Amino acid sequence: MKLKLDNRVVLVTAGSKGIGLATAAGFQACGAKVAICGRSQDKLDAAAAQMPGCLALPGDVSKAEDIERVVAAVTEQFGGIDILVNNAGGPPPGLFADLADEDWDRAVELTLMSVIRATRLVLPHMRAQKWGRVINISSSGVKQPVPGLTLSNSIRMAVLGWAKTLANQVAADNVLVNTVCPGFTKTDRIAQVLEQQAAASGKSIDEVAAGLAAQIPMQRIGQPEEIANLAVFLGSEAASYITGTAIQVDGGSVQGF
């Protein structure tokens, strides 16, 4: 199977570490021209050093002006964006009773509006050339809520509804919109969740991690590269008849059909 990604231009938001970095590296390994953005210049520099030729741009996806600047810079450098990978760190853990309006507002800007704004900017180019891919990195929480992740479980469902609706609207232009739903994966995000659960239970982080892995049918937490593999496939020509889907990569954790 040939992915046919040579010279396709890919923007991966929050691409300086974790799943974003693994996804950017996966696309580049398949011949794509890759751009990433992130909030930390040090992490951007480290990521770019791993991917010669990568365009690494500072930017906070929760800020509209940063998204506009990043998309403009990638377009100027490469002539347009063929594949957009919408990725961002998830909103913080928290129980409903502990969340104020400000927490919800920040989570909406980070998780929902970042995706909407970036996609709005890249769609005209994709539709004009009759080829494009929008890939959203979400969470298995849209299939089975993750305890303690009230903001993420809620707002990611809004993104999923938007993505399915958009997929129907742009499919005739050969612009495909899909969602990747990672389960527990070795990232800074899972480290934060483990710390929260350890503090709440009185157990050590290692004990919580072992208990978590024991609940996964594959008996382990996933690696970022295992999530990236699906994202790269969905961005390729090999996935030319797949749109409007939400696919979990979770070691079998989600128990629904």
Image: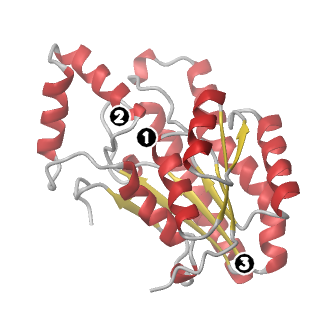
Examine the image and state in which quarter residue 120 appears.
bottom right
Q: Earlier in the sequence, mark 1 or mark 3?
A: 3
Q: What percent of the width, then of the height, locates residue 65?
A: 83, 36
Asked which secondary structure carries label 3, the reply is loop
Circle 3: is it few (<14), some (14-19), or many (20+) Cα within 10 Å? some
| Kind of residue indicated by mark 1 | Asn
Query: Contact, CB < 8 Å: mark 2 with mark 1?
Result: no
Query: Contact, CB < 8 Å: mark 1 with mark 3?
Result: no
Examine the image and state in which quarter residue 150 appears.
top left
Circle 2: is it few (<14), some (14-19), or many (20+) Cα within 10 Å? some
Residue 174 sits above or below residue 194 on the image:
below
The residue pinned by badge 3 equals: 131
Circle 1: is it few (<14), some (14-19), or many (20+) Cα within 10 Å? many
Cα–Cα span, label 1 and label 3: 31 Å
| Kind of residue indicated by mark 2 | Ile
Residue for point 35% across, 34% down: 190
Asked which secondary structure carries label 1, the reply is helix
Is residue 118 toward the left or the right of residue 154 in the image? right
| Kind of residue indicated by mark 3 | Trp
Between 11 and 125, the residue placed more toward the observer is 11
The residue pinned by badge 1 equals: 153
Visible residue check, residue 163: yes
Q: What percent of the width, then of the height, locates residue 71?
A: 80, 50
Q: Earlier in the sequence, mark 2 or mark 1?
A: 1
Visible residue check, residue 40: no
The residue pinned by badge 2 equals: 190
